[in-house]
Structures are given as structure tokens and as C-alpha cells.
Amino acid sequence: MDKIIPNITPATPTANYHHGNLREALLAASVDIIRNKGIQGLSLRNLAEVVGVSRTAPYHHFKDKDALLAAVAEQGFIEMNGFFGKIIQNPDIPLMQKLKQALTDYVRFAVQHPTQYELMFGRDMWQEENHDQFQRTAKDCFRQYVQLFELFKEEGLLAESENPLRLAQIMWATLHGLAKLACDGIFGKQDDLDDIIEYAMSRFENLTHMPK
Amino acid sequence: MDKIIPNITPATPTANYHHGNLREALLAASVDIIRNKGIQGLSLRNLAEVVGVSRTAPYHHFKDKDALLAAVAEQGFIEMNGFFGKIIQNPDIPLMQKLKQALTDYVRFAVQHPTQYELMFGRDMWQEENHDQFQRTAKDCFRQYVQLFELFKEEGLLAESENPLRLAQIMWATLHGLAKLACDGIFGKQDDLDDIIEYAMSRFENLTHMPK
DNA sequence: AATTGTATCTTGACAGTGTCAATATAGCTT
DNA sequence: AAGCTATATTGACACTGTCAAGATACAATT
């Protein structure tokens, strides 16, 4: 018998039995669900139903639920990598401005998509060996971030004794802690958050020889 | 009668039907399981079996699985509150030493019990309104921590312009970020961690008027 | 001491989950 | 046209959280 499902065709209008680009449809829907209903809110069966496909279809594109989650997390880092790149490669922005922009955008992303951010830095993603692709993308992102601090060093704006990698790590830890506390609802007010970023930035400026 | 609190009797080898102190047994076992097998590794049914009781028995002591998790998380903050208190109230330790000790112990706890720490600061615990008792205990803990910074201020060791609460928040964010990155396996080496704590401390010392 | 009430614990049941096995279909390669 | 492989499907299983109904122990009141 023929399929009654009207098939909400995803980009390519193909037959009904073969979805065509199920993988990306699953990924997009997963990102959506996770952002709206949290990690707990994503079940493979429900997801399959939303996309209009049978329960076990996803298993041909993702080994596991875990693998799917890793893909969603990776998607987050890809996005991050995007706006980091835009900032760093833009020659019109002065260095200090770049840093501030990067920090702000970082926290903004976290606060805007708290559950996806939770996934990206979740223990499960980093603990096991399974998530090679994810970890590679994430590390690319971090590398780009560190580059910012190396620029400071190269331009002689950091004291000789300062290690740019270490500095980047601490700054990232601060940022990450801030972001998590904020989007987990532990820091109450958003105003506080902006203030604190400002504060952290000024703390950093003390370490530079910037002409103010 | 003079029984102020009836039935404190723990571990009484009474009949089998009534466990006696099931609540605490469940809590202890849960902490154990979560520390060893992670949050995912805890199922109510398995827990019940371990404690030697039927599947639904826990529901007479915890409304939900969520409520049980909240209790486990709270247990963590109680422990933290303990060693914070010991440090702060010890008159033999100089102030700067106290801070360093507190920071070190904090990170040590996180690294030693990463999954419980994950729970304590997990989104689920803080988002909903249900976890009053937990949140109160956690905030007590934070309040004690802030007290440390207020001591610095009171003794005139902080510049007038520095806000001790803000400072505590940033420092906590840094610590929290560090702890999470470390125990989620994102920062590879433990050596790095110690170094970074040292670094963060020295950064803080720059803000004080300590006689070195 | 008997009764009654309440807290505690039990078994039975249900819907929901991730995932495997076996099967069917589509589309590409030859 | 044939067949191979990637893709999708239904059926099944063990496991989960949680509710309802019944059983048991203990405490307080009579």
C-alpha cells in the first residue's frame, strides 16, 4: 500500500521510502528539540516521529543515541568556530576589541542555547573515546581562541613572563564557569553577567601594555 | 514522653518488612552509585535492589527520582560546607592561606567526585522550583565562601574600589570553570590544573596589599 | 489490651525508552 | 536486466519511572 504520510519533503523531493537526506533532517530536528526541550527531552522514537520516519531509521545514520548527541554537540562548536573566525580574521577590528567581542559572543551563545552548551561541555562527550570527530572540531575551536592570545604576545602587548596558552586557559575557564553558572540559573540576574564580563576584561587589560 | 525525636534508631536489625532507616540507606547508596557509575548509572530499581527493598519503596521517602538526585546533590554541598567551615573558623591559619586552602579543597572535591559535582551544578537542579531544600543548602555554602573575601575587605587588604562580592563571583566562576573542565576531561593533565590554580592565586594576590 | 490510624513496604501493571534481528524497498553499478 | 548495497520497516526484548491497590508493622487512643 502506498504511504499516506504527506512527507514534509526535506529540501530534496525524493520518494517516500528513502528519505533523501535523513541524516541532516535528524540532526536539525535534534538541535531544535534539544534547544527547546533540553537533553532529556530528546528521545529517538519521538525524534523519528517528528521527522516522519520509523523508530530505527536513525540507526543507519548514527550508531547510537550517544553518537547523535555528539553530532548535535559538534554542531554547536561548528557554529562557534564560525563567529570566532569572523572576528579574528576581520582586519578592521583592533586587537583588544576582538578579544572583547569574542568573549561576549561566547557567553551570548551559551546563554542563548544553554542546553546545547550543556551538551557540548558535558562529561559524556569528553570522557569516552568514541567521539573523535566531535573532539577534533571542538579542539579546532579552542585553538582558534588561543590564537587571539598569541596575537597579543606577538605584538609585544603581553609581558614576557606571561604564557599566552596559560592565560587563554584561565580566561576560558573563567568564561566557561561564568557561562555555566549563568545559563544554569545559578547567577540570578543577567545584569550581573555583563558587569562581570566587563570586570574580567579590565582585569585582563591590566596585564597588557595597551596604549589604553 | 521524653522521646524528643522518636525512632532515630539507625541500623536496627529489626524485622525485614520495615527497613528502619531506609531513607538514609537509599541516600548513601545513591551517593555511592553516582560517584562510581555516574548519574546515568543510577536507576531506582537497581538502587532498590542494592538496598534490598522493593522497586517502589523509595517513593515513600522521595517524591521522585528527581527529588532523590536533589538529595544526593545537597549531600555534596553539606560536605563542602563542612570543610569550608573548618578552614574559615580556624584562627591559626593566616587569611591568604585560608583562601588558598579553600580553593584547593574545592577543586579537589570536584575532581575526586566529578559526577556528584556534575549533579550539584547541573542545570536540572537549579532550573526548577522544586528543589528548595537543596538550593538553600547550596546558597549557605556560597555565602560562607563569600565571607572569605569580605574578611579581606574588612582587614583593609583590598583596594577600596574592589567589591568583595563581585570578586568572589569571578573567582568562583574561574574555579567552577576550571573544575568542570578538569573533571570532564577537557583539560588533559592534572599538572596543568595545579599550575593554573597557582596562577589564579598569584593573579589575586596582585589585588591585595598583603605584606607578601 | 484491643482498636484504629498512619507510615511503610509489597506486588501488579502501564507507558515509554534504547536497541537488536529479520525483512523489505530503492537506487546505483554492472 | 541483474544484483549489490544503502536505506527504511516491523517485531521483539529488556529496562526504565511511576501509579494503584493491597499487605504489614508500629503508634496512639480508647
Image: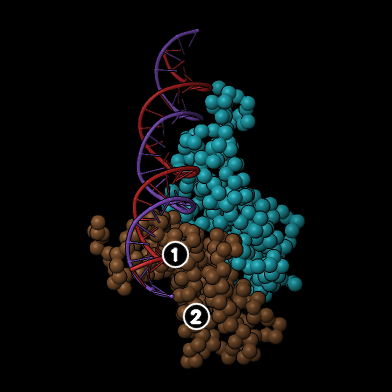
Chain colours: A brown, B cyan, C purple, D red
- Residue drawn at the location 64% of the way across and 80% of the way down: A164
Comes first in the chain, label 2 or label 1: 1
- Residue drawn at the location 54% of the way across and 41% of the way down: B46
**Quadrant placement of the N terminus of chain B:** top right
| A35 sits to left or right of A177 | left
Q: Is residue B2 above or below residue A15?
A: above
Subunit that carries the residue with mark 2:
A
Residues packed near mark 1 inside 10 Å, few (<14), some (14 to 19) or many (20 plus): some
- Can you see residue B105? yes
Front residue of B12/A125: it is: A125
| A202 sits to left or right of B112 | left
- Residue drawn at the location 37% of the way across and 70% of the way down: A21
The kind of secondary structure element at disc 2 is: helix
* 2 vs 1, front mark: 1
Q: Which label belongs to residue A61?
A: 1
Residue position for label 2: A84
- Quadrant housing residue A12: bottom left
